[in-house]
Image: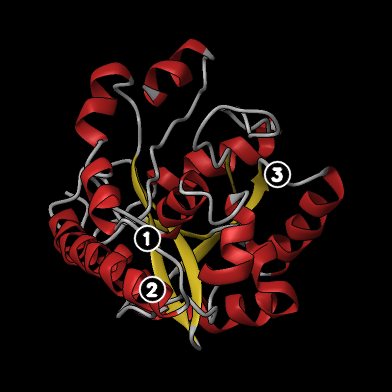
Amino acid sequence: MVAERAAAREVELFCLSDHDTCEGYDEVTAVFPDALRGVELSCTDNDRTVHLLIYQKTSSSSWHMLEESLVVQKQVRRDRVYLIAERLQELGVELDSERILRTVPGVVGRPHIAAELVRNGTVRSKDEAFSRFLKDGGPGDVKVSRLSLAEGISLGAAAGGCMSLAHPHLYGKGAEELIRRHLEFGLSGLEVHYAKYKSARRAEFAGLAEKFDLVQTGGSDFHEDGPGKPVLGVDMSDTVAQRIFSWLERDLPGNA
């Protein structure tokens, strides 16, 4: 279990931020009582997928609003597997959608489909599955109805959360404008200390966070063990860490 590994590594602040679900929170707190409640919410902005990190430390009577939205998103994702299978079949690619849904009881996403394409020999790697078929706008991609980034931030704020834009490198030169347009909705953090970033990239995004007075958050993006995979835990300075703690403790709407 990820929480057990985090506790063993003496991670000071832990949050299981799965994609579009926080179903594992109760299991996590059984091992890591001080863990944050959180989620990585899939949103859209101008037909582009944007990931929003929502963290909550203090108990909120409004968190159920977010969880209800996540239940809907979970079903949308499961329905999309069938639609992607149909799209791939038109391309002459077989995909066992039932096997995917049977082996992934939680929230299913394109990485699970990519793994199945590796398993059945269609591609050699998940990266190849995305580049050939599953990337945004790719021949096997199927758009789903999602919250806009503004709606996601507003929902997170109403639920008493703190919002941070995940892995900003994905947005290229548009990251700054993306941030600028969403400050008014409650965006207040930026994932600067992302496990895959080298020091130069962290410095770049630290400067961007400073420009907009955003809290510098961090994440290991840990999905599984293996060569080249990120390890649990992200190192950051005491100054950065203390600002995160202060950010999480602030009095937010919905906290009770």
Label 1, on which residue?
Answer: 95
**Is residue 91 at least partly visible in the picture?**
yes
- The percent position of residue 82, horizontal first and vertical second, equals 26, 68
Residues tagged 1 and 2 counted as in contact (Cβ below 8 A):
yes
Residue identified by numbered label 3: 196
Q: Residue furthest top?
A: 8
Residue visible at 59% across and 55% down in the picture: 123
Of pointers 2 and 3, the one earlier in the residue sequence: 2
Is 254 or 133 nearer to us in this picture?
133
- Identity of the residue furthest to the right in this view: 200
Task: Name the kind of residue labelled 3 in the image.
Answer: Lys
Tell me: residue 146, above or below residue 119: below
Tag 3 secondary structure: loop
Residue 136: give x, y in percent of width and height. 53, 76
Name above or below for residue 227 compared with residue 187. above
Q: Which label was assigned to residue 137?
A: none
Query: Are circles 3 and 1 on residues that touch, CB within 8 Å?
Result: no
Q: How many marks?
A: 3
Tell me the residue at 48%/11% (across/down): 8
Please name the amino acid that badge 2 sits on. Gln
Residue at the outermost front position = 92
Residue toward you, 184 or 2: 2
Mark 1: which secondary structure? loop
Q: Earlier in the sequence, mark 3 or mark 1?
A: 1
Mark 2–mark 3 Cα distance, whole angstroms, equals 34 Å
Q: Nearer the viewer, residue 17 or 205?
A: 17
Give amino acid for label 1: Leu
- Mark 2 = which residue? 89
Question: Residue at position x 38%, y 38% from top?
Answer: 16
Residue 78 lies left or right of residue 169; in this view the side is: left
